[in-house]
Amino acid sequence: MKKTDRKRVPKKCALLILMLTLLLSIAFAIWQFSRVDSQKNVIENTVKYASNPEEGDNVDSFSLAEYNYYIENFPLDRIVGFIDSSEDAIREAESIWIELFGEKVKKQRPYKVSFDEENQVWLVEGTLHQPDAYPNVVVLGGVAYLLIQKSDGRVLAVWHEG
């Protein structure tokens, strides 16, 4: 090996390290930007929930009969008191979810609320967010669910799918 070749090797290594560092910095900046943008969208997309399902508001309806499997397999022995509004249902659901699944459940905001008029039961579920920067990417994960009676706040079931 010539003396001049030995001098070139460290220069080539230094150049390679510099290029890799630059590439990693750019990738990290893009990742940080997409996280901030996603969190911003979650905050901006706050859903306004109606206070009473009997007033013909925008709370969806559902059939409790479709959730018997979850009631049988994921019960929770807890009564939280009368649940008068979708806001009450959300507050209690999030409190229970945080206790069971941790603070990360807040990333599932805004929550979707449905009401079974016949059985007087609330269904609260989280939202699985698709990153705006990657609309064609399949998102893995799941969301939390909670079924709670309006009359006494008895939790019928709580589970996390995904």
Image (cartoon, rainbow, N blue to C red):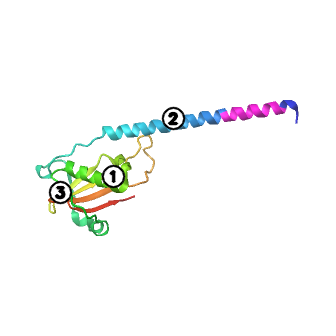
Q: Which mark is residue 98?
A: 1
* Mark 3 vs 1, N-terminal side: 3
Crowding around mark 2 (Cα neighbors within 10 Å: few <14, some 14 to 19, many 20+) is few
The boundaries of the magenta stretch are 5-17
Residue 108 drawn above or below residue 70? above
Frontmost residue, 120 versus 135: 120
Kind of residue sitting beneath label 3 = Gly
Q: Using residue 23 as the reference point, say whether residue 95 is left or right of it.
A: left
Secondary structure type for disc 1: helix
Relative image position of residue 108 (x, y in whole percent): 34, 48
Separation of residues labelled 3 and 2 (CA atoms):
47 Å
Q: Give the quadrant of the C terminus.
A: bottom left
Left or right position of 59 against 106:
left
Query: What secondary structure is marked by label 3?
Result: loop
Mark 1 or 2 closer to N-term? 2
Instruction: Name which residue lies at 32% across and 46% down.
Output: 109
Q: Which numbered circle lies on residue 81?
A: 3
Which residue is nearer to you in this view: 155 or 68?
155
Taking the spot 30% from the left edge, 46% from the top edge, the residue there is 110
- Disc 1 to disc 2, C-alpha distance: 30 Å
Mark 1: which amino acid?
Ile
